[in-house]
Amino acid sequence: MLCIPRRCFALLVLLALCFAAPLHAADKLRVLLIDGQNNHKWQTTTPILVKALESSGRFTVDVSTTPPKGSKPEAWADWHPNFSDYAAVVSNYNGERWPKPVEDAFVSYVQNGGGLVVVHAANNSFSNWPEYNEMIGLGGWGGRNEKAGPYVYYKDDKIVRDDKPGPGGHHGHQHPFVIQLRVADHPITRGMPAQWLHAQDELYDSLRGPAEHMTILATAFSDPKEGGTGRDEPMIMVLDYGKGRVFHTPMGHADYSMKDVGFFVTVARGTEWAATGEVTIPIPDNFPTADKLSPVE
């Protein structure tokens, strides 16, 4: 048996740790989060989204903040993210159109395999940008109507594509609501309870759009008692856009809506899937149940 002096053994352990740390960091996925304009308080929700991703141990997150609304063109000229540096882009943005070179680079990025994550009001944005609407599948507000595409929802456990005229985007009173899985064997939802309670939030309904190459993984009942539609509305969606993958959740109105283990895990797993097509982030033991919330401190 080879005997290693204690001092040499300690040195070997130290060297192993030094080399292991960079390798572990290299395994993390780089993610770009975009904010800067929103009808919601992005200044408070962006840090929580960063925490949801980085606390999973799977990501490093850079934040790119656009110029504020009404900025002059020269301010926008200095904003041009290098999308290709990232495995996925997370949008916490709802505001003015981006400069055309940025939009073109973004479309090319997703078409060629980049991941996109759409959170809450990011689906309100860019109602007149056709490629973006194809990426996100469904959107609300921004003048969307029947020209944008059908309403898409579940009714009597069946998907409905409703072409009737009307505006896109509505929600009732904020309240906690139950998420109902519709596809339990997708990498994002695999291992989740069939039903789980989500924190107080705006339950978006009446979303409409092209809804092509889209799979609804989970819904929530839009209760008429809370001002809702009486339908099961999409809450977790995935889409293909060219070679790219898109994860879309209308959840996440405010900081209190995001400080929820179910939301943290769903966004982290959705982002990993958008970036890689696979999910390695586990479902934790404290994941919410159908009748019990699981807040994040």
Image (cartoon, rainbow, N blue to C red):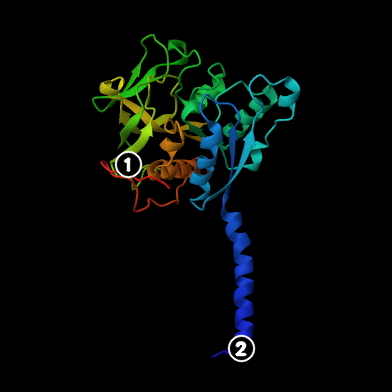
Please, what is the three-letter code of the amino acid marked with disc 1?
Ala
Hey, which residue is sitting farthest left in the picture?
156
Instruction: Bin the neighbour count of mark 1 within 10 Å (Cα to Cα): few under 14, some 14-19, many 20 and up.
Output: some
Hey, which residue is sitting farthest right in the picture?
74
- Asked if residue 112 shows in the view, the reply is no
- Residue 12 image point, x, y percent: 62, 77
The nearer-to-camera label among 1 and 2 is 2
Q: Quadrant of residue 225?
A: top left
- Residue 111 image point, x, y percent: 58, 32
Query: In the displayed structure, would residue 224 be above or below residue 277?
Result: above
Q: Quadrant of residue 4?
A: bottom right
Q: Secondary structure at mark 1?
A: loop
Residue holding disc 1: 184
Towards the viewer: 20 or 263 = 263
Instruction: Bin the neighbour count of mark 2 within 10 Å (Cα to Cα): few under 14, some 14-19, many 20 and up.
Output: few
Towards the viewer: 89 or 50 = 50
Hey, which residue is sitting farthest top in the picture?
165
- Asked if residue 172 shows in the view, the reply is yes
Query: In the displayed structure, would residue 200 be above or below residue 31?
Result: above
- Residue 121 image point, x, y percent: 49, 26
Q: Secondary structure at mark 2?
A: loop
Task: Give the numbered dot on residue 218.
Answer: none
Marked residue nearer the N-terminal end (1 or 2)? 2
Indicate the quadrant containing the N terminus: top left, top right, bottom left or bottom right.
bottom right
Q: Quadrant of residue 209?
A: top left
Please, what is the three-letter code of the amino acid marked with disc 2?
Pro
Disc 1 to disc 2, how far (Cα)? 54 Å
Q: Residue at x 38, y 50 (%)?
A: 283
Residue holding disc 2: 5
Query: In the displayed structure, would residue 51 be above or below residue 34?
Result: below
- Residue 33 image point, x, y percent: 58, 37
